[in-house]
Image (cartoon, rainbow, N blue to C red):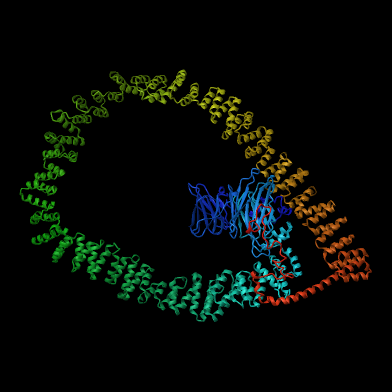
Amino acid sequence: RANARCDRKLPAAHGGFPPEVDRQGTMATPPVTVKEVVSLTSAGVNPACISFTNLTMESEKFICVRETGAANSVVIVDMENPNAPMKRPITADSALMNPVSKVIALKATVAGASQDHLQIFNIEMKSKMKSHQMPESVVFWTWISPNMLGIVTSTAVYHWSMEGDSAPGKVFDRTGNLNGAQIISYRASQDMQWFTLVGIAPGDPSRPSLVKGNMQLYSVAQQRSQALEAHAAAFATHHVPGNAAKSQLVAFAQKVAQPDGSVSSKLHVIELGAVAGQTNFTKRQAELFFPPDFADDFPVSMHASDKYGVLYVITKNGLLFVYDVATATAIYRNKVSNDPVFIACAAPSNGGVYAVNRRGQVLLMNINEAAVVPFVSGQLKNPELALQLAQRGNLPGAEALVMPKFESLFAAGDYKSAAELAAASGGALRTQQTIQKFANVPAVPGQNSPLLQYFGICLQRGQLNSFESVELARLVLAQNKKQLLDTWMGEDKLECSEALGDLLTMVDPEMALRVWIKAKANGKVVAALAQKGEFEKMGKYCEMTGHKPDYGYMLQSALMHNPLGAVQIAIQIGKQVPPPMDPNAVADLFLQRNMIREATSFLLDVLKGDNEEQAGMQTKVLEINLVTFPNVADAILGQGKLTHYDRPRVAQLCEKAGLYMRALTHYTEITDLKRCCVNTHSIDPQALIEWFGTLSAEWALECVKELLVSNQRANLQIVVNVCKEYTEQLTATSIVALLEEQGSNDGLFFYLGALVATSEDPEMHFKYIESAAKSGQIKEVERITRESNFYDPEKAKVFLMEAKLPDARPLINVCDRFNFVGDLTTYLYQNNMMRYIEGYVQKVNPSNAPFVVGALLDQECSEDFLQNLILSVRSLLPVGPLVEEVGKRNRLKMLTPFLEHLVSEGSTDSNVHNALGMILIDSNSNPEHFLATNEHYDSKVVGKYCEKRDPNLACVAYKRGKCDIELVEVTNKNSLFKLQSRYVVERMDVELWAHVLSDENAHRRNLIDQVVSTALPESKNPEQVSVTVKAFMTAEMPQELIELLEKIVLQNSAFNNNPNLQNLLILTAIKADKTRVMDYINRLDAFNGPEVGEIAVGNELYEEAFAIFKKFDLHLDAMKVLLECLESLERGLEYAQRVDTPEVWSQIAKAQLAAGDVGAAVVAYIKAGDSSDHSDVIDVAKRCDDYQALVSYLVMVRKKIKDAKVDTELCYAYARIDKLGDLEEFIATPNAANRNAVGNRCFDEGLYEAAKVMFISDSNWGALASTLVKLHQFQAAVEAARKANTSKTWKEICFACVDEREFRLAQLCGLNIIVQADELDQISEYYQVRGKFDELLALMEAGVGLERAHMGIFTELGILYAKHRPEKLMEHLKLFSTRVNIPRLIRACEEMAAWKELSFLYIAYDEFDNAAGVMMQHPDAWEHVSFKDVCVKVANVEIYYKALQFYLEEHPTQLNDLLTVLTPRVDHSRVVDLMRKRNHLALVKPYLAQAQTHNLQAVNDAVNELCIDEEDYEALRNSIDLYDNFDQIALAQRCESHELIEFRRISGHIYQKNHRWKQSVELAKRDGLFKDAMEACAQSGDKELAENLLKYFIDTQNKECFAAALYTCYDLLRPDVVFELAWMHGLMDYSAPYMIQFMRDYAGKVDALVADKKDRNTEKVEAEKEAVKEQMNQNLYAQLLPAALPAPPMPGMEHGNGMNGGDAPPNMGGSPNGMPGMGMPPMGGMGGY
């Protein structure tokens, strides 16, 4: 598809090349193929990034694209897999992929400096290899080799190696001709001794459109540079015949503007550094032919192909030139890309070149190997170049060129030249026949045989083919020179074949094997590897090649001679898929010979896949080994690679073989498992434990039981380990039950010992305690009872008491931890274990001593023991619990000595002192003194103890300890309220007051009475009074509080003038009894008037509040109450008049304003002089529409403040009351009014005159224009719009003028609108909807003349013309075709059927296909000249043939004119077929004559047919001679029967061209054209035909023709036949000239033979003399090595006439010349350059 598409789009070659090259453009097989290999856009590359600055292609392997945007990245396209590009998030200014490996070089500009940072990164290893910061900016860089970067700065060129850690090294400085140029290329020669740097710059002023190219050529050896003019350059190598080394060439292309205005385009090929003693390469120069359409095009890239020896030159606009390197001959030129090409690179793998264009196409251009040689020889008529191309590239198509020359050289005895020609002919002459021909030539003594010369030349040129390799090997082996074969094989000079391997097998089997492998002689390779015993290699080779040898025969043979080898063969058989032999049969062969191990090895290798269908073989291999080698079977089973064998059978065999563990893993019945598992003596314990894990819980328990039953002692450890391992599966309950059933206490102990560490089951812990106790493990019992938290303490206690262990520590642990101290003490006391009681109290837990003492008292233990026990603990003993326990039993006196002892030691423990106090209270030993003076007892404890004994003592104790609640409770209980009231008042505790005054206190009233009557009057402390009052307030007891406060405030007391109490009294009355408030206000004077007044307002006591504010002269607050609370404007106005203060007037004004009385409010505001509420006044006035009052107020306000809103509203108020004079006067004064806002408001409300005043004062011309429109003042509106100059304003005025039919003014406005493209459609639509088409056209016609006219105006005018003035449309299009929107006009023309204009638009839009279609479908759109121009530009070739049919039907007289321009583009065969079907061939005869130059059969047949029909024999003969591609025999047969003799002569002529000599001669004889007959015989070379013609002349007595035939056919006639015929028919006189000539030739040949024989004898004598000296036969075959193969000496060269002798060309060995004519002085050692 890509080729087809490319061929369709690319035009044929342009003029300038030879005619053959031009004709090639229409051939089916061009010499160069062009195909699209990758589409970068299809691969996902951003099209915007496909450019010279973003894309690099350093080799044929990778393309690297930098994508820039929101997220920068680098896209790497692998040419082997282009559809899967690799994208990496990399930000860089440039990125280069290494030519051969996945290594990328990155360049980034250093921020804030003119420096670049370079980095080399290995993508596969994800590591940075090198980095460097250049001191100056890098303008260009590229890979010049796989490990070297070339870096170009503005001043110099550097090289940077990828290896090591070296920095970039400077190589040379740039020449001045590159200053200011953009560098586009830097190249290095293969030997890195020459470099070219190419840059482009703007063209000369005389030709600015032609880009100028400059080049710098640098020599490393001479350290010199030369400046040249060139756009592209490339290095190449070429082998000059006769030279040992290749010549280094440089090619460069230049396109230079000449002073006379012409352009010179040249290609130069020059040798660099010519080697002394070698023939210099002749400097070449050729023209680069650029077609006229490409006058400013220039080369951008050049690449040399070493494979074909050609140069590819690619230009910016997509031209491809192909030139021969050696001769600079033009081979091909064509346009290969319709888009600009900006980068290219060579493709060494195929000899072509890649190029990338702006569209993202990656094109591969390459030599068409099948077509290039015939093209060059046939079309270019250059057989010599064709032969050179064929020799260089081993290309087909040169057979016809070399065979005659080879035969002539061979016939002449020039065997060396013949050998060189054959060796260079590709495959044309290197055949078995050529070898045989050279072998048949006898060798000249003292010289190499021609065959050896042929082989030597072929070796020098490269590899021999199969025939040559065998023949040369046979010769070498016959002379025992095998080492030569080793050398040639290493150099890959011989083509390997089976015949060559057979020849070598007896001499060197290893070399033969290598040859067979290369030749893919599979049978021979397999046999050789088997014979060597390398069976693994044999198998791999067979698998790799797919070869299938006879394994059965090989295996049986190996079994008899090499059993180990047989195993390897068998393994290779098993590896085949499918195997060539049945593996069972193979195994049986081994088993028949009792080769068990070998059979096992084979079967195991076969069974590696573990397939189910191999179950029989798996069983088989296990059976044979279980019977013979059980350990092998065990190892096989241990690998686990076999899973499909017969498991029951294998299990039985395993049990018999003693492999019990394997048997257990294979048995599936419980009886078998129980039978096998008891053989623990032969089973690895760990394996057995793991096996239990594969069983179900039931079967596992059965097997465990079997182990215990069979031998409990021996198997106990295994059983315990199994139970430990699989407790979760078997469950601990089942295991314990099983062990208990078998009576295994030891088993239980060991099992549970591991379980209790992780288990929380109380039963398991108890079982463990029980089993340990029964097993005598007392220490373990003590440990588990001490550490475990999960056993049942009650069960453990009971069990341990019943067990009566000699050690009581386990029982002590249980009872101590779980609070069984009483039971423990009782058990120990009853069992007379007093020592354990003392030890427990003293060492284990002294804190439990009180409980022990209590239990011992219950057991009636002696007081002496108890006192001693208590004293033994002393300070460690908790006194509180001890007192509690002893007190429960009424034995406190027993503790007196102990307590006194503690007090004497200075104890301050409250428990000690509490106990002493209790003892004193009980004994009534002055307890009041103790309670008052002791500081250490606990008041609550002691007070509680005293409550039932003496409440007063309890109060003393509680008061001492501030135990408020307890004291209140005891006083309430005993009705001690006076005591309670005094305590509460003195205590001054808020929480206590809250408690006693709560509703829940049933004695609250009693307490309040005592507080009011006794406690508070007695108090002189203000704080106590304050706390009490607050408590009453907090308790929300207003009546009680009033009662309390009246007693304090209104009666004579120390607190009656207290402001706080007065405030509190009034406030309490406000809340509790509002009727008393006014009385309190009048009676009291010290309260806080403002605060109390606010509280009164809050409680809606407005009159009381007014009285308070009035009493304290708070006028504002009083007015606020009147206005807001009492809502009495009258009382407020009266109060204001009485007070007469600005603040009060302001307050009344606000109230009046809120009531909507604007006039009164304004009066009040004026009296108050208050302007603060002007916003509210304005809003209310507007709402009430009282602008008259508003004006008065705002005039006052403006005197006090300067506010924009005030001025604005004053303006608006003037406008509303229609005082325009005052308004204008106000505007004239300085003000801050928002005039625009006022104007807009007036406009919106229809006050247009006022709005006009405001807009004029504000210079708001747009709004003024709108206002004037409303006032119908259109002229003034236009003037205002001109000042406003906005689209909105112009549209408004325009639309209004249109509606009012003011079209002149509307046009003025419209011209200012349509210059805005976005507004154009709206204007047009407005006019058209109202039917104003003429006015719209006038507007648009005026608009096209505007300076700011845009495409939309021209387009809209065109659409209007199409709709309303079609006669003006074409003129408009011709004038403004470049300024209209063509697609829109196309649609309009289609709608309005304007076909001629439509075709014009299609042409202007480059839609030539559509233009042609319109012209053909609508004859009124057709015009011949225009149609011709369109046809040559269409893309669809079918249109060509539709156009021809159209012309046939409509304009036949102009058909040939059309065909003239279509000739390079149409398929001529198809055109001829079309004309033939329409019977109009004669009509297109001029076209046929022009098209015949392409030598197409259809065209030739048509021309020939016309010539016959017109009886124009001269034209027919010219056609036949010039163009041979037609059915020649058919034409000859047709002409043979023609009535005119000239046509019959043409028939004979055709027969001659087709080598039908006999027919030609017979036809000539029939027509009496004897001269034609004689010439035909002479050209035929047929002796018999010539002799028959002689006999015909004798038979017809035509003696003159007889004599003429002897002269004409002299070389074909035999002398004896001529003499015989002449003598027999009396024609000796007529034969005399022939006889004389024959005798002269015969005598000359004899003389030549005699001279030749003499020369041969002389040469033979000289050769024998020289043979002794030279001894050439001793080193005959050693000279066959390519490096030492000399050219055989030729006759006449023995005396110094060799390459360096006198016959050498004049320039060979001389000093090389410079470059005359190029302006380039010689450079010494730079050779031809």
- Residue sticking out furthest to the right: 1626
Residue 1124 percent across, percent down from the top left: 31, 25
Relative depth, front residue between 1550 and 670: 1550
Quadrant in which residue 1168 is drawn: top left
- Side of 505 relative to 616 (left or right): right
In this orientation, does residue 1680 appear?
A: yes
Question: In which quadrant of the rendered image does the C terminus lie?
Answer: bottom right
Rendered position, 58 above or below 417: above
Rendered position, 786 above or below 1076: below
**Which residue appears at 93% of the width and 71% of the height?**
1624
In this orientation, does residue 1627 appear?
A: no
**Which residue appears at 85% of the width and 64% of the height?**
1577
Quadrant in which residue 233 is drawn: bottom right
Question: In which quadrant of the rendered image does the N terminus lie?
Answer: bottom right
Residue 75 percent across, percent down from the top left: 53, 53
Numbered marks: total: 0
Relative depth, front residue between 1693 and 21: 1693
- Side of 1171 relative to 1028 (left or right): right
Residue 677 percent across, percent down from the top left: 37, 74
Residue 21 percent across, percent down from the top left: 72, 54
Relative depth, front residue between 610 and 732: 610
Quadrant in which residue 1585 is drawn: bottom right
Rendered position, 442 above or below 126: below
Relative depth, front residue between 560 and 445: 445
- Side of 1317 relative to 1244 (left or right): right
